[in-house]
Image (cartoon, coloured by chain):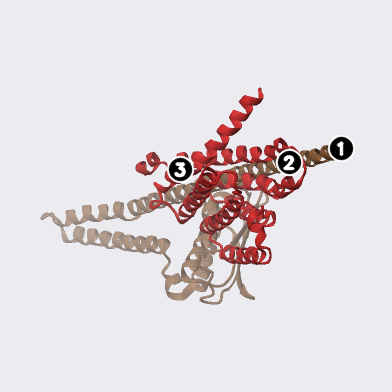
């Protein structure tokens, strides 16, 4: 009787021992669970940070490439339209200093100088206009976009239908410039690469939402390839849209033209 | 393993834990002014536990054969107070102060109602204080999930493992004393606790070595 009583008690002790073992196991499991979760979380965080850095690098790269291209274009423009012409002027002016020159010749040379300088003046005005259209600064986005569209129409390469209804100061002036540049880039892409015959542009500010719709019927392109091409217009357009906190939706495929839609909330500065 | 070797080993482990209880505070006190608030509270914990161990040991020497169980009361109280402050330093949560005050009040009421408890294992207080500390410890584990740099990760894990497993040992303390069983069996529980405690102390040393040793601090 006494022995069985003791046996019972030993069993209780055994149960306690097993329970302690289980608790030990459980606590180890908890610690290990947290340890491995932590490792995993930190790993994903690191990957995310690396991706972000990679993206920043790409953005920087694109900016630099674009900047370089722009510099090259300006240098080319200055050389072709101004420097070479001024050379002619300099040469002609040199002739004028000649003592043996007859008045008729002097008149002729003077006329030539006048003609060339007029062209140079016109060219320099055009270059400055291309760099930053004064209309945008003086008369606002509506006028600038209309002017841009008229200029494009004058090329007579394609039909351009445009509908501009912009409420002034709907977005900040910095964002207005971004939007203008995006439109410029779209036009220049269409002219350079698409071979389109028709372009449609619609800029609206309605119900607290600005929207720019751009469509052409050109040969289109593969979106993924265009994005990966450094310094090309597409990534520039998207980056500008990001900067102005707008959503940018580009649809295009081989043979189907391009459709770009940019929407933004009013005065959404980054 | 022969019985004598086993007994010697257990006695050695017992003495080692007492020695380490006195040695660890010295180790941690060296960096007391250099490190964070949590570090100071943890050092306070080590000092208090060291004092309790020393008191218990001296009591055994000078009053041989008398009860030393009331040291358990101080052990639980100091452990709960200092580790609560330690977790307050780590987690920086205000509710910890509230929980600590309420728990201490409840324990005080318990002792007022039943003063005899002072000379017994207060299993309720032991288990509840352990559970609260385990809760803080898990909270801190969760907190450390997203933080790259966290201090006391090792010690926190060791606290979780030691407190959770030892809470059952403390909970069954009175049961074992009341049961009519051979002392060797009840000793098993005490010995398990000794081994667990030794493991805990070793982790404390490793944490010190890895993060707070003077080699490390002199480099930084």
The quarter of the picture where the C terminus of chain B appears is: top left
- Residue drawn at (68%, 38%), measured in percent from left and top? B187
Query: Which element is circle 1 on?
Result: helix
What colour is chain A? Answer: brown
- Which residue does the numbered mark 2 point to in the structure image? A22
Instruction: Give how far apart the Cα atoms at labels 3 and 1 are.
Output: 54 Å
Q: Nearer the viewer, residue B49 or A210?
A: B49
Instruction: Give how far apart the Cα atoms at labels 2 and 1 are.
Output: 27 Å
Q: Nearer the viewer, residue B121 or A77?
A: B121
- Which residue does the numbered mark 3 point to in the structure image? B211
Instruction: Give how far apart the Cα atoms at labels 3 and 2 are.
Output: 31 Å
In this rendering, do the residues under marks 3 and 2 share a single chain?
A: no
Percent of width and height locating residue B12 = 56, 32
Residue A192, placed above or below residue B189 = below
Percent of width and height locating residue B2 = 66, 22
Q: Nearer the viewer, residue B151 or A193?
A: B151
Tag shown at residue A4: 1
In this rendering, do the residues under marks 2 and 1 share a single chain?
A: yes
Pointer 2 and pointer 1: residues touching (CB < 8 Å)? no
Query: Which element is circle 3 on?
Result: helix
Residue A258 seen in render:
no
Residue B100 seen in render:
yes
Describe residue B8's horizontal placement relative to residue B209 as left or right.
right
Return the residue found at the far right. A1
């Amino acid at each position: 009787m006494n022995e069985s009583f003791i046996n019972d008690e030993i069993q209780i002790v055994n149960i306690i021992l097993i329970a302690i073992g289980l608790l030990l196991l459980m606590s180890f499991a908890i610690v290990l669970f947290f340890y491995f979760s932590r490792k995993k979380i930190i790993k994903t965080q690191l990957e995310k940070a690396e991706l972000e850095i990679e993206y920043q690098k790409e953005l920087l790269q694109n900016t630099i490439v674009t900047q370089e291209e722009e510099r090259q274009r300006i240098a080319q423009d200055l050389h072709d339209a101004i420097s070479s012409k001024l050379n002619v002027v300099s040469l002609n002016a040199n002739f004028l200093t000649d003592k043996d020159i007859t008045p008729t010749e002097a008149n002729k040379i003077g006329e030539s100088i006048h003609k060339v300088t007029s062209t140079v003046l016109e060219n320099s005005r055009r270059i400055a206009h291309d760099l930053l259209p004064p209309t945008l600064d003086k008369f606002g986005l509506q006028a600038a976009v209309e002017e841009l569209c008229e200029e494009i129409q004058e090329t007579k390469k394609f039909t351009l239908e445009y509908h501009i209804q912009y409420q002034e100061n709907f977005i900040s002036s910095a964002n207005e410039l971004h939007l203008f540049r995006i439109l410029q880039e779209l036009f220049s892409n269409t002219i350079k690469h698409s071979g389109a015959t028709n372009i449609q542009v619609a800029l609206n500010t309605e119900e607290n939402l600005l929207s720019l719709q751009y469509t052409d019927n050109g040969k289109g392109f593969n979106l993924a390839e265009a994005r990966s091409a450094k310094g090309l217009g597409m990534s520039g357009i998207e980056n500008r849209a990001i900067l102005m906190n707008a959503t940018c939706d580009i649809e295009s495929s081989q043979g189907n033209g391009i459709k770009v839609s940019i929407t933004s909330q009013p005065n959404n500065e980054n | 393993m022969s019985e004598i070797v086993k007994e010697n080993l257990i006695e050695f482990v017992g003495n080692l834990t007492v020695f380490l209880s006195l040695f660890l505070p010295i180790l941690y006190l060296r960096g007391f002014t250099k490190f964070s608030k949590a570090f100071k509270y943890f050092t306070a914990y080590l000092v208090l536990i060291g004092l309790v161990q020393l008191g218990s040991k001296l009591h055994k020497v000078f009053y041989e054969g008398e009860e030393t169980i009331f040291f358990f009361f101080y052990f639980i109280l100091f452990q709960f107070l200092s580790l609560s402050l330690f977790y307050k330093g780590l987690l920086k949560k205000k509710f910890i102060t509230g929980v600590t005050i309420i728990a201490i009040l409840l324990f005080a009421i318990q002792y007022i109602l039943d003063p005899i408890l002072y000379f017994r294992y207060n299993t309720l207080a032991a288990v509840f204080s352990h559970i609260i500390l385990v809760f803080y410890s898990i909270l801190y584990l969760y907190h450390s999930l997203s933080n790259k740099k966290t201090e006391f990760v090792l010690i926190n894990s060791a606290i979780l493992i030691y407190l959770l497993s030892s809470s059952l040992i403390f909970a069954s303390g009175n049961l074992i004393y009341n049961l009519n069983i051979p002392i060797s069996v009840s000793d098993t529980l005490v010995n398990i606790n000794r081994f667990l405690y030794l493991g805990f102390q070793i982790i404390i040393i490793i944490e010190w070595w890895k993060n707070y040793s003077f080699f490390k601090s002199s480099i930084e």
